Amino acid sequence: MDLDLFDLTGKVAIVTGASRGLGQYFARALARAGADVVVTSRNVESLQTFTKEIKSLGRRVLPLPLDVRDYQSIQEMAKAAYEYFGKIDILVNNAGCNVRKPAVDVSWDDWNLVVNTNLRGGFFVAQAVAKKMIPVNYGRIINIGSVTTVAGYAGITPYCASRGGVKQMTMSLADDWGQFGITVNCLAPGWFKTAQSKVLFDNQEWVDYLIDRIPLKRAGQPHDLDGTVIFLASDASAYMTGQTLLIDGGISTGATKATV
């Protein structure tokens, strides 16, 4: 096998929502594989330390402000990234949020916040970047979902709805843009301890319950996503599009303790 297929040297990747958590995992992995990186956050100052880290890897990096709920912000980010690097090869569509409430307590604004961020925002970021990819007949778009892309959990209904929508959106965009050499896939992580999920991981009883349901008997670690994001960003996945890859330790199997 030609391992050069996984080499991202000379590629330019955008990673949205890169001020913390999974966004930083993705950007770090792509940079280590050779890519130059655009990292975004609503608060661009929050990217300063991470920008220095990427530079220390010998990669070019451009921090940009982005609010995915603001159409103009999306257009300005895509324009600035393209003008700086002259191309965009890879998009990791990661920016997202969550609201944890019983379904009966979810407000109109709660729903709009989560769905407009995770689904509507993700679509228009992909659209803006695809417009730069289409003329050159090349692109790798990686939409970030979660295990809730294929499974529902109580207390996070808007989030589950938005992540399920990401899966359907991924398949539609793959069909729409495949003719232009653009692949669109969904990377769906399972349970990883991030700033967004910290409140859950602080509850040891919940952690024990979670680990018991995961066939590999542990939560995700940062390095667990590296191989998949590099694969989806590289030419190794050139004939794969419209797919959802669950990196979840097997929890989506629905398995529980054997009773036989």
Image: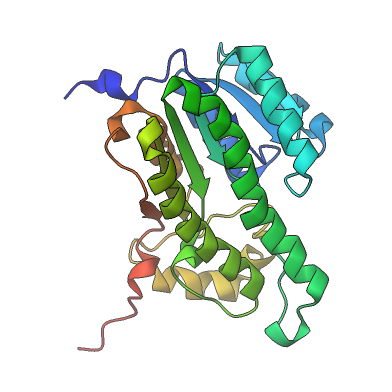
Residue at 71% from the left image edge and 58% from the top image edge: 116
Of 164 and 36, nearer the camera is 164
Residue 33 place in picture, x, y as percent: 43, 22
Q: Which quarter of the image is occupied by the N terminus? A: top left
Is residue 203 something that shows in the picture?
A: yes
Of 134 and 76, nearer the camera is 134
Q: Quadrant of residue 99?
A: bottom right
Q: Is residue 34 above or below residue 185?
A: above
Give the total of numbered labels. Answer: 0
Q: Is residue 136 above or below residue 185?
A: above
Is residue 190 something that shows in the picture?
A: no
Residue at 46% from the left image edge and 72% from the top image edge: 151
Of 86 and 114, nearer the camera is 86
247 to the left or right of 22 = left
Residue at 54% from the left image edge and 38% from the top image edge: 92
Q: Is residue 8 above or below residue 111?
A: above
Q: Which quarter of the image is occupied by the C terminus? A: bottom left
Q: Quadrant of residue 43?
A: top right
Snapshot colouring: rainbow
Residue 53 place in picture, x, y as percent: 64, 22
Residue at 76% from the left image edge and 78% from the top image edge: 106
Residue 164 place in picture, x, y as percent: 51, 65
